[in-house]
Amino acid sequence: MSTFPTSPNTLMIRGLESIFTLSEEEKQALQDLPVQVKTLEAGQDIVRLGDRPSRCCLILEGFTCVYKLTSEGKRQIMALNVPGDIPDLQSLHLKVMDNSIAAISPCTVGFIQHEALRNVCERYPRITAAFWRETLVDAAIFREWLLSIGQRTAYARTAHLFCEILIRLKVVGLVENDTFDLPMTQIELANTIGTSPIHMNRILQALRADGLIQTQKKQVIIPDWEKLKKAGDFDPHYLHLEV
Amino acid sequence: MSTFPTSPNTLMIRGLESIFTLSEEEKQALQDLPVQVKTLEAGQDIVRLGDRPSRCCLILEGFTCVYKLTSEGKRQIMALNVPGDIPDLQSLHLKVMDNSIAAISPCTVGFIQHEALRNVCERYPRITAAFWRETLVDAAIFREWLLSIGQRTAYARTAHLFCEILIRLKVVGLVENDTFDLPMTQIELANTIGTSPIHMNRILQALRADGLIQTQKKQVIIPDWEKLKKAGDFDPHYLHLEV
DNA sequence: CGAGCTTTTGAACGCAGTCAACAATTGTGG
DNA sequence: CCACAATTGTTGACTGCGTTCAAAAGCTCG
């Protein structure tokens, strides 16, 4: 586990300039945040329900997910995280984790101490606002997922999910020619959509047959964006990408 | 529509002292917020998806809900709001509403201009933190609802919902002898649970038959809290009522 | 190259949705 | 205060989406 700043990389944090263009000083303060970098294997938990973390976790590479289990052991994934996300930013104000976070693919994450984040927020209220906003966007995504899981068929839900992933990966430059890597098993997709793995398998077959997605290995190609959007009843407003 | 401060009431806002005990000055700043009070009939929208509000809405009396519609017109309620809640606090940082909010019962709400809220937040960072935290608790509730709707049976989901409502109403003093008013139709309950009204009707019959709830008019009695908790797989941690 | 996970297929079952009709309640205007 | 309209709640029957169980085939990786 190495400690930044030692690498030439600059920290990419989702949406920090959605409201304001940050000043050089503000940007510098963010880049000066001490970050502990760690690599994780697929499947490893990063934080667990019940934990009282003293740091947040910034995704640098790979995919993670937010999940919870019922007492019967059924698993629901309630968020996917891509590079630039801070899936446990909530822990800055909610002392006890009410969900777990796990690596879906092998990934590298950067840990930032709460104390350091609080210092930056104290000094730069606009950074506070930007972080706050990011947690609000996460909540907006939860709302859309609730609509999806509550009111749409599993088929539409899955199309909707692929739409969202495409857009969010585009933002961080991980889409080329409508193609992206999606290192998720069908079991994980099923846990996200709220259906059984067997049914998820059949949904994917249907989506392929209908020409909405193509898959090879863990790559997904979206051959017809408009058709996929329509099938998923997808409207990107809830992602709040533009102001 | 009258304008506070004209009434003797003090503003009750959910969870503002969860992190810090506020100073007299901070409390006063909150009480001095200009509030436009309005009464609403059941069913009326307060804000709508697509709106760009310039104010937030504090529930003073009655119940409201956050909801969205699919393009087919199916309705999902993704949050219930009780007195003390600010269901659109998000609009402080997300310019365009990604959901609608409607009165479930006749209710009185207080509108507070964004500008006034921003001023208070600028001056008192701990109030910023407290408001931010409230939006994080809302997000935690969304996560639990996602788990519920994705992985629990409609019967368990409904039991879980009654558990949550009981707890949240207790906090604001609206429960007496395990009894509370719930001015929701079965259609609205169905829209919350993500099921059909007919099925909701049968679930309620089952819950009554199993001795988990008693209903008379729009009153609900919880005769056996432990049994209801168990049926709903309910663990109140996600409400973050204690630190 | 074999163990373990993931994907795929088939078949039976069941939870929940839909349709239709009726009863009960609430609200409204005469 | 009553009659009528509209909404809400209840019941029955049928349908279907999605689950579960079981088993085989395909990958991946030590």
Image: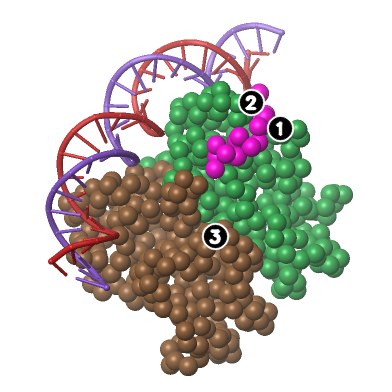
Chain colours: A brown, B green, C red, D purple
The amino acid marked with disc number 1 is Thr
| Of the pair A69 and B57, the residue shown nearer to us | A69
Report the Cα–Cα distance between label 3 and label 2. 35 Å
| Of the pair A88 and B24, the residue shown nearer to us | A88
Quadrant in the rendering for residue A40: bottom left
Q: Is residue B221 magenta?
A: yes
Query: What x and y, as percent, mark residue B15?
Result: 71, 57
Report the Cα–Cα distance between label 1 and label 2. 9 Å
Q: Residue at x 47, y 36 (%)?
A: B154
Q: Is residue B164 magenta?
A: no
- Specify the label residue A49 is tagged with: 3
Residue numbers of the magenta segment: B214-233
Chain designation of label 1:
B
Q: Which residue is mark 1?
A: B179
Q: Which residue is mark 2?
A: B215
Q: Residues within 10 Å of mark 1 (few under 14, many from 20)?
A: some
Report the Cα–Cα distance between label 3 and label 1. 31 Å
Query: What x and y, as percent, mark residue A243?
Result: 49, 68
The amino acid marked with disc number 3 is Leu
Q: Residue at x 50, y 88 (%)?
A: A3
Kindly tell me whether residue B140 is visible in this rendering.
yes
Query: What x and y, as percent, mark residue B214?
Result: 64, 26
| Of the pair A121 and D5, the residue shown nearer to us | A121
Chain designation of label 3:
A
- B121 vs A163, left or right, is right
